[in-house]
């Protein structure tokens, strides 16, 4: 790895960490706030992140095809495993008090209880990668289902159309 890439990664990491800490970013808690009706601030933040990332994913294909990004709109699989996985994910968020970004932010702010949470992510990820993924590889439907193929429209138009609504929603939230 070149020194320039290490410096770029370091600058990005520091910038993202500063952003996450200053904004109080935690997607899990933010989604909970939205569903309970008290998450206007985090809702604006999630809309901004959605707009930037969706446009970035779509237009990255035109910058370089070898960026390693998945096809926009690809659904990896579906079925009963998603329900079980969602229940485990929700239980984990409930037990640790947030998602990985929120946990890292809490640890960075000095909450040492989150050392245990961060350390528990390591065996959890190892369990997923080395045990669950090979077990599910045989019986898990990984058919590529693309919205753009279903309705025969260029994905760029779909993303731009959805982003128009996201920008309008952001405008309405800011205006209030």
Image (cartoon, rainbow, N blue to C red):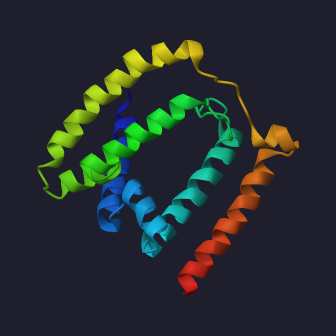
**Residue at 31 percent of width and 52 percent of height:** 98
The quadrant of the rendering that contains the C terminus is: bottom right
Count of numbered marks: 0
Q: Hey, which quadrant is residue 80 in on the image?
A: top right
Asked whether residue 74 is in view, the answer is: yes
Residue 59 percent location from the top left of the image: 68, 47
**Residue at 47 percent of width and 14 percent of height:** 135
Residue, far bottom = 176
Horizontal side, residue 104 vs residue 90: left or right: left
**Residue at 52 percent of width and 29 percent of height:** 81
Residue 101 percent location from the top left of the image: 34, 50
Horizontal side, residue 77 vs residue 94: left or right: right
Say if 16 sits above or below 146 in the image. Answer: below
Horizontal side, residue 126 vs residue 53: left or right: left
Instruction: Name the foreground residue: 170 vs 96.
Output: 96
Say if 145 sits above or below 170 in the image. Answer: above
Residue 87 percent location from the top left of the image: 42, 40
Asked whether residue 10 is in view, the answer is: no
Q: Hey, which quadrant is residue 26 in on the image?
A: bottom left
Q: Hey, which quadrant is residue 161 in on the image?
A: bottom right
The quadrant of the rendering that contains the N terminus is: top left
């Amino acid at each position: 790895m070149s020194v320039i890439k290490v410096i770029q990664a370091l600058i990005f990491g520091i910038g993202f960490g500063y952003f996450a800490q200053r904004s109080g970013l935690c997607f899990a808690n933010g989604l909970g706030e939205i569903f309970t009706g008290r998450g206007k601030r985090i809702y604006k933040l999630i809309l901004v992140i959605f707009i930037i990332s969706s446009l970035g994913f779509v237009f990255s294909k035109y910058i370089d095809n070898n960026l390693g990004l998945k096809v926009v709109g690809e659904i990896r699989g579906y079925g009963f495993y998603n329900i079980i996985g969602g229940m485990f994910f929700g239980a984990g968020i409930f037990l640790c008090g947030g998602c990985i970004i929120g946990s890292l932010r809490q640890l960075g702010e000095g909450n040492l209880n989150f050392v245990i949470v961060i350390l528990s992510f390591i065996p959890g990820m190892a369990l997923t990668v080395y045990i669950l993924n090979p077990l599910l590889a045989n019986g898990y439907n990984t058919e590529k289902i693309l919205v753009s193929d279903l309705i025969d429209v260029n994905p760029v138009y779909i993303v731009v159309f959805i982003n128009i609504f996201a920008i309008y929603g952001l405008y309405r939230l800011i205006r209030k």
